[in-house]
Amino acid sequence: MHDPQDLDFVGSIRALIALGRIPLACEVPLSTLLGCVLASQIFSSSTSSSNSIFSGLNGWATLQCMLVTWGTNIAINYGNEWSDYALDTPGQQESIRRDVNLREALAKKAKGEAGGETGGEDLEEAAKQANSKLYGNTTRIIHDGTFPPWTALACCAVWQAALVALIIFSRAADPALSGASLGNGARTPFRGLALHLGIICTILSHSYVGPPLRLHYNGFGELVSALFLSPVAVLFGLVGHYTASTGRPVAWSDLFTSNLPTPSGFTLDKSLWLLFGALYFYEQARIFVMHIHDIGTDIAGGKRTFVSRIGDRRAKDLYAVFNVLSVTLFGLLGARFQARATAIAKFDRAGRREDAPARARSSAGQVWIGGLVVLLNCALPVIFATYRVLVAEIPQATAPSADVPDALPDASLKHGLTGTAEPALRSFHGRPVPDGGKVYEPSRKAGGISMGDCIKLVSLQTMATPAVLTITALLAAYVGQRAEKMDAYLH
């Protein structure tokens, strides 16, 4: 069913922006920014002697790294709309049909109340415009006839081609690679490990729902996307910024070697590995919440995601496990900072004075502890509220019958059952579950928060995490510099 919208040029641009979810694609570049800031503060070879906390931050390299991760995320969003077109069509067509019927009913009612044809036409046009604004900024623009379906694929190709052009220009402008600079002579971040990470992540990310791998359709999408969206994005920023600032490309072996120093000078200590692990589990928990909501739709469309394979109850339990692991790793990271500060305090009490850089790192570590406390104080209420809603909405402790699998979205899809034919079925997002002959309606709210509210809160929480950590890194650098200056002044 077609119901094309009459959009002007600006409206068309806004609709295409919404199709790629461009305003919501900021999580990955924020993680990349965190990696760049960490590189500017951790590696002495990528910092200058200036007193500013931004002195070691290579702005051009940071911008390039952020543009690549941001643009890749947008290109993937467009590509996913194309790859998921067949799966989304039934639901979108039903939604369009429902909106058209509602609009026609409103128009008839308005015409009758107006007592004349002119008033009714005016109200019908107003209803049409209101409805256009309501759903003009969703993916249905490629389902209702406003744009042909290949528009999503074309947008994906344009964004990805622009990113390839940026990388080619950046490498051509690097005197170490081209011999003659095409620009200001700045070194490119796209060498060695950074370039390899970019290529691998781009290919696998486009295979999230796209052929040939279609990871999300085969149970691997959630696991891969959680890895790329957060820890790998931070690592890409770390490696890319380091490569551009020092001119030394990082090798894969530099990540895992115990022989120090490495040929490139780049190393990852235990604190960074703890941070990567905490961010991964944090992101994985969010993705599970997002996909629990879509289990019924995914199975109906033949998309056997990891969450749909294990069922909503196990996914709920894993949400709790992942958050516990994330909080634990953040706690271990804070404990490392605290142990370092305690060791320096013992030296002072013993009358042995640590060097100024060590004392500065200790002061910076205290700031990191404070930042982690702030982060967890903001995250824990969201985690508890979300888990409470999951417990309230997901059926508990009932083994599914042999002919109704754990993650089946709708009994009618398997055996044509209805509520009257099988009163012992209850559902979560449309999934029937036997429960001793009783019928339960899942709670739509727990403590005044709905599942939709929780999804929004978890998404905001995940986007805020790299921002909080970036601010913490900058504040830690500032406090460390102040402590070093004060130590030099006093001694």
Image: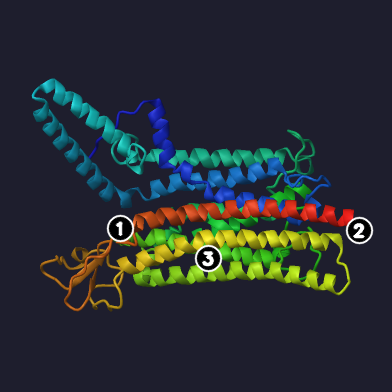
Evaluate whether residue 402 shows in this view: yes
Are discs 3 and 2 less than 8 Å apart at CB?
no
Front residue (pair 175, 27) = 27
Instruction: Give the residue at mark 1.
Output: 297
Q: Where is residue 84 shown, x and y percent of the image?
A: 37, 50
Q: Is residue 460 found left or right of 190 in the rendered image? A: left
Q: Which amino acid does label 1 sit on?
A: Thr
User: Judging from the image, what secondary structure is the residue with disc 2 in?
Assistant: loop
User: Judging from the image, what secondary structure is the residue with disc 1 in?
Assistant: helix
Instruction: Give the residue at mark 3.
Output: 281
Front residue (pair 71, 317) = 317
Marks 3 and 2, the one that precedes in the sequence:
3
Evaluate whether residue 308 shows in this view: no
Residue 234 to residue 103: above or below: below
User: Judging from the image, what secondary structure is the residue with disc 3 in?
Assistant: helix
Badge nearest the viewer, 1 or 2: 2
Q: Is residue 196 found left or right of 242 in the rendered image? A: left
Marks 1 and 3, the one that precedes in the sequence:
3
Residue at point 22%, 41% (across, down): 99
Q: Where is residue 18 shown, x and y percent of the image?
A: 41, 40
Quadrant assignment, res 277: bottom right
